[in-house]
Image (cartoon, helix red, strand yellow):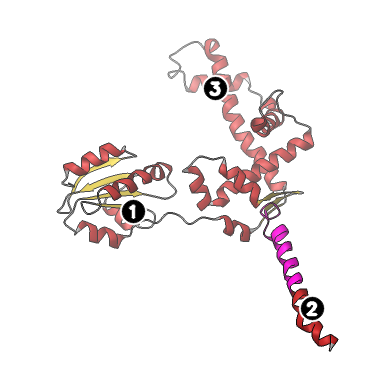
Amino acid sequence: MKKKTFLNWGLPILIGLAALGVFGYLKLFAWNPERQKIAQINERSISVAQFNRELAKIPSPYQDIFREEPKQFLEQLILKEILLQEAGKKGVQSEANVRPEDREMSIIQNLLKKEVLDKIKVSSEEIAEIYEQHKNQFGQKPQAEISSLIEELIREAKGKEQVETYIASLKNKAKIEINEKHIKAVTALPPPTDTAEDFKKAIQSGKPLLVDFGANSCLPCRQIRPLLKEIKEEYAGKAHILIIDVYKFKELAREYKIQLIPTLIFFDKKGQEVFRHLGAWDKESIKNKLKEIGAV
């Protein structure tokens, strides 16, 4: 009888406690962004929470693009972590009185200066060679007059190349592990764009048409999207506003000879191209052009 009574009330309680324990574990560990490792670099890791905090510092639309392609941003965080770890080994510190938010960048700059930039040598022969090659561009000025300028140009070119080589060598030596599952979890869907079929229907609709030929990965394209969305709402029933991704619909991009994105093409009611604008454009100019082609 006692056993039966226990089964009636005791077992459900035990099951409930076990479930609560599992939930608590998941919340504290498996589901906790602070404990989820999106990448491991040598002995240190980058958590999902850290990734999100760093990404939140970036203004839109850069942030939006990186959320859709998080590996690009994660690569930057990994390189920063590698450089900070190397700076720690070399005992490199930040500049004095630097702001807390600039401390890491100061450390990295000092590391590159110590390990690469301060070691760059420029010979008099190199200066003379550059001078002879570009004497006309220097306005035929005497070499002695512009030697310091030439030296600085050579030092800058060498510095860029040697910094890239140095960083690549550190990356090659580092043990890097990326958690693809967590990468997928933080990946955002790109904004929807229109199709070639949408374009065909719109150009045959008897209404003015504006097509933004661009791409989701293009920063100026993303900057103009909010304006186009507002215009689309304002001109509903009067004109069609489409966004065509040139990488998805390459044939359409070739047909209209798109060489720069974004390219805004305006079509009249007969479906004839009447105007195109290369690059981003302001809202009022776009609206004025739509009115010119009959969107009233």
Q: Which label was assigned to residue 10? A: 2
The stretch drawn in magenta includes residue 215: no
Question: On screen, 30 above or below 34?
Answer: below
Q: x%, y% of residue 8?
A: 76, 83
* Residue drawn at point x = 71 percent, y = 28 percent: 94
Judging by the rendered image, the residue that carries numbered circle 1 is: 244
Please rate how many residues cluster around mark 2, counting C-alpha atoms within 10 Å: few if below 14, some from 14 to 19, many from 20.
Answer: few
Please rate how many residues cluster around mark 1, counting C-alpha atoms within 10 Å: few if below 14, some from 14 to 19, many from 20.
Answer: many
Type of amino acid under label 3? Glu
Location of the N terminus by quadrant is bottom right
Question: On screen, 240 above or below 3?
Answer: above
Please name whichever residue, 42 or 205, is drawn nearer the observer in this view of the structure.
Answer: 205
Type of amino acid under label 2? Gly
- Nearer to us of marks 3 and 1 is 1
Label located before the other in sequence (3 or 1)? 3
Please name whichever residue, 295 or 214, is drawn nearer the observer in this view of the structure.
Answer: 295
- Please state the extent of the stretch shown in magenta in the rendering: 16-37
Question: On screen, 141 above or below 242?
Answer: above
Prevailing secondary structure of the magenta residues: helix
Q: x%, y% of residue 155?
A: 60, 25
Res. 231 visible in picture? yes
Specify the quadrant of the image occupied by residue 169: top right
Q: Element under label 3?
A: helix
* Residue drawn at point x = 80 percent, y = 87 percent: 4
* Residue drawn at point x = 66 percent, y = 24 percent: 121
